[in-house]
Amino acid sequence: MTALPDLRVRPTGGSWRARHDGAVQTPSSDQQAIPPLRRNPVQRRSADRLARILDACAELLDETGYENLSTRAVAARAGVPIGSVYRFFGNKRALADALAHRNLDRYMRQVAERLSGAGPLEWRQAVDVVVDVYIATKRDTPGFALVDFGVQAPATGPPGTATRRVAEQLCVLFADRLGRTPGDELRRAFLVGVEAVDAVLRLAFRSDSAGDPAIVAEAKDLVRAYLARFLDGPGAPEPARERERESGE
């Protein structure tokens, strides 16, 4: 029987390699997708003001929804002049986009920290951590239910942009720690996996505001079973070639 790869934290290489700084490698394509601020904060005071503005935006999203969100209300809640909001953002859409990217950055850092501090893990357990951190984030993070990792109100970007960002970063994270190359097939597998589990988790939160535990468990089973085709064993099967062979029989 082929041994399953494990996500063991080791200081010098191995199946699961932890980064000492907990950083998550972000592909350059995702860097280009992040909406630029009108002005980047240079001083600590400006960075703190930006954080307060995003915090206020998140709180107001929970209270009023996206349609009733306004830059003026955000400025009042943050305790800053309206000009400070426009210094960084042109409109409320840009505000919500920035909040979504902050959500993703914090989520990926929490995933990396949990995995790095968990000790020996098999990749299926790591998938559970990814889902568990998402559930906790959705429950506890202001504004997350509306913005998530990409604004769900009238979108201007191509469909699935936020999901692709999540899938890309998770693919890079897993491939890096498992010593795999994040090629097109693995990237596609993570995209399909993230899209599928996202749909099931939405059902879980429609059924129960805290996330129906039984449906969450089904989501984990679903994505583990799917990714097993790509991640099991050092000589993991190549599904595309298998499908070609099957179609030729």
Image (cartoon, helix red, strand yellow):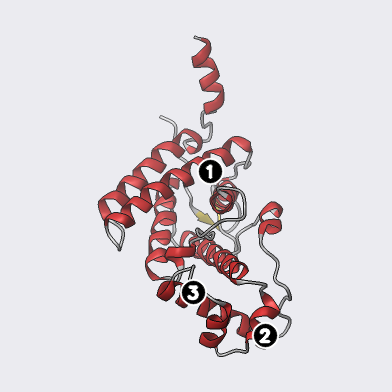
Q: Position of residue 234 (x, y in %)?
A: 53, 35
Q: Position of residue 142 (x, y in %)?
A: 44, 73
Q: Amino acid at mark 3?
A: Ala
- Which of marks 1 and 2 precedes in the sequence? 2
**Relative to residue 182, is residue 116 depicted above or below?**
below
Compared across the picture, whether 30 is left or right of 244 comes to right
Q: Quick one: quadrant of the N terminus? A: top left
Q: Secondary structure at mark 1?
A: helix
Q: Which residue is mark 2?
A: 83
Q: Nearer the viewer, residue 23 or 33?
A: 33
Label 2, label 1: how far apart the Cα atoms are: 39 Å
Q: Residue at x 57, y 82 (%)?
A: 72
Q: Nearer the viewer, residue 80 or 44?
A: 80
**Relative to residue 152, is residue 197 depicted above or below?**
above
**Residue 14 in sight in this render:** no
Q: Amino acid at mark 2?
A: Gly
Q: Which residue is mark 1?
A: 191
Q: Which residue is mark 3?
A: 58
